[in-house]
Amino acid sequence: MFRGFYHAASGMLTQQRRVEMLTNNLANIHTPGYKADQSSVRAFPEMLLQRLETEKSPTGNVTTKMSRIGSINTGVYVQDLTPKFKQGDLNKTELSTDLALNNITMPTNADGMVGSIFFTVENPDGGLQYTRNGNFTLDGFGFLTNANGQYILDTAGNPIQLTSDQFTVTTDGWIQQNGQNVARLGIGYAENPTELTKTGEGLFAWNDGQALPSAYENDQVSFSIQQGYLERSNVDATESMTEMLAAYRTFEANQKVLQAYDRSMDKAVNEIGKI
């Protein structure tokens, strides 16, 4: 009886976490470069039930044996939340400081995972971070920064400083002013993007802040940088709402099972227990 309580409760907690994830996805539907989370739901290990029995032989000897009853599931849980790195649509803004990464050809690794590319961002606490959000600006000293004030880095890992917002970015990452190359945007390539860790504000980290391999040095990677564009969130509003309704219904089904167990327990304690 108590196992039923645990199973139903674990199902409710799992669906609650899925709803929270889907709600966060919908809240970021207009966040440039946002990558929607997707959940992996797993079952706890099954438990094998056995019964200990004693038998008395005609000679009076008592023997003990184990008889197998069967296995029983012990509930479910959300194993992890994994971002979906599918590219979002590009939205034209005509702002020189808005940049978008456009995947052309991304290799597939041995596990069938498609790689992805990212802008390189300096982490004030040390190490590097990466983002697909190209909504940049120039600070008071002319450094190219993101919305959090973090420096956007070039291929050498240095902050990019410009004299004004009158600059051009070529499709292969070169920033030009007055017809001269000033710096080249640092673009990191993740062979398996699921190894990246979300750090908030649309940022990711790899191996505790270590540097990703350069996308420019991989002959199999083909991409372009579009100036005056922003990559939209890849959240599918219709799909997310459908999944949220399904999660609500599953939550309610587990809730009704829990209430049924509660009524059965109430009857066992208050009615059967009086007999």
Image: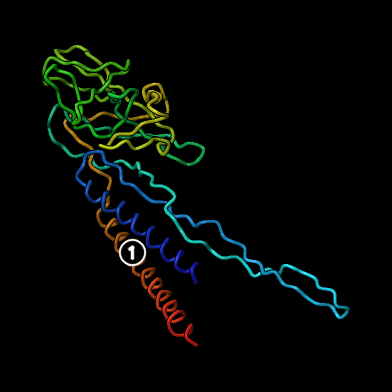
In-front residue for pair 28/181? 28
Residue 104 image position (x, y, % from top left) = 33, 34
In-front residue for pair 140/264? 264
Residue projecting furthest to the front = 274
Decide: is 240 above or below 70.
Answer: above
Residue placed at 35% from the left, 44% from the top? 84
Element under label 1? helix
Q: How many numbered callouts?
A: 1
Decide: is 3 above or below 27.
Answer: below
Instruction: Identify the image quadrant of residue 14.
Output: bottom left
Residue type, numbered disc 1? Ala
Residue placed at 25% from the left, 25% from the top? 171
Residue 63 image position (x, y, % from top left) = 80, 71
Residue placed at 37% from the left, 62% from the top? 12
Decide: is 105 above or below 155.
Answer: below
Query: What crowding class fits label 1: few (fewer than 14 Cα within 10 Å), some (14-19), or many (20 or more)?
Result: some
Instruction: Identify the image quadrant of residue 207.
Output: top left
> Which residue matches tag 1?
246
In-front residue for pair 164/271? 271
Here the colouring is rainbow
In-front residue for pair 273/92? 273
